[in-house]
Image: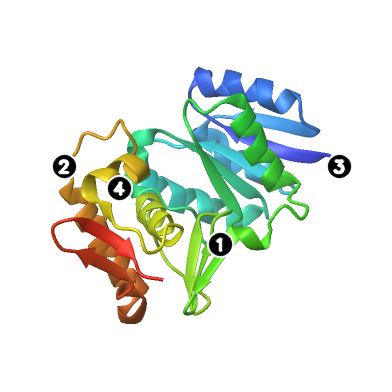
Amino acid sequence: MQRKTVIFVADSLDNAHKFQQVLSYLDVDVVAGSSMQFKKLLVQHAGADLVIYEMRADASADVSHIEQTILEDTQAALLVILSSDQLADFRLPLQLKSDFVVRGATSEECTARIRQLLWPGNESSSSDYISIDGMTVNLATYQVSVGGEPLDLTYLEYALLSFLVTHPGRTYSRDALLRRVWGFDYYGGSRTVDVHVRRVRAKLGPELAQRLETVRGVGYLWNA
């Protein structure tokens, strides 16, 4: 494999120590710094292949700034580190090859995601894509497009849509969707599912939205 350059940006020692170990086993040169040094690191290492960035509190605003800053100076891919409570507002960048890991992910998962971004090879297969009436769901990159145009979905909107699309013709209750999509640690009300369904339908457009059906008194299903 060709040796790569990674810029690691974090303000916490926990992630710095963890990723130092992960990266030490890969064929990469690493430059590291804090978020205050981010722009300087990009200018100094314009040929970098990957930026690993620890997200601050405002995930939605922060990732947009990160994306634009990277595009100004490099062609690097992006791996975002974020906490589980930031997932609701998180969107992967549309203009960068990108992925994310949640704080606390295993070293093996972090390594796998870094390898995919740095040495993608031909790991994507036809099974990574689902195409329905002009909509394409890319299960490998967590992205959805309709008519070739990317949809601006939050992570949870994507997760809800992709779960239902990959389980067509089956009705899931709100509580079941909370367990399968939001996770067992979610303590909010089940009506949050209704809110996310409405948002997904609005973004899909009228024709595709009809496939995301409400089963009265039960929950939701994707009609294939």
Mark 4–mark 2 distance (CA, rounded to whole Å): 12 Å
Q: Quadrant of the N terminus?
A: top right
Mark 2–mark 3 distance (CA, rounded to whole Å): 48 Å
Q: Is residue 14 left or right of 116 when viewed as pictured? A: left
Q: Which mark is residue 189?
A: 2
Residue in front for this viewpoint, 58 or 22: 22
Residue 169's x, y, as percent? 37, 64
Residue in front for this viewpoint, 78 or 11: 78
Q: Amino acid at mark 4?
A: Leu
Give the mark, 4 or 1, whose residue is nearer the N terminus: 1
Give the mark, 2 or 1, whose residue is nearer the N terminus: 1
Binning the other alpha carbons within 10 Å of mark 2 as few (below 14), some (14 to 19) or many (20 upward) gives: few
Mark 3 = which residue? Answer: 1
Say whether marks 4 and 1 touch (CB < 8 Å): no
Q: Quadrant of the C terminus?
A: bottom left
Q: Amino acid at mark 3?
A: Met
Q: Is residue 91 left or right of 126 when viewed as pictured? A: left
Q: Nearer the viewer, mark 1 or mark 3?
A: 3
Mark 1 = which residue? Answer: 95
Mark 4 = which residue? Answer: 177
What residue lies at 21% left-to-right and 33% top-to-bottom? Answer: 187
Question: Relative to 194, does residue 183 appear above or below in the rendering?
Answer: above
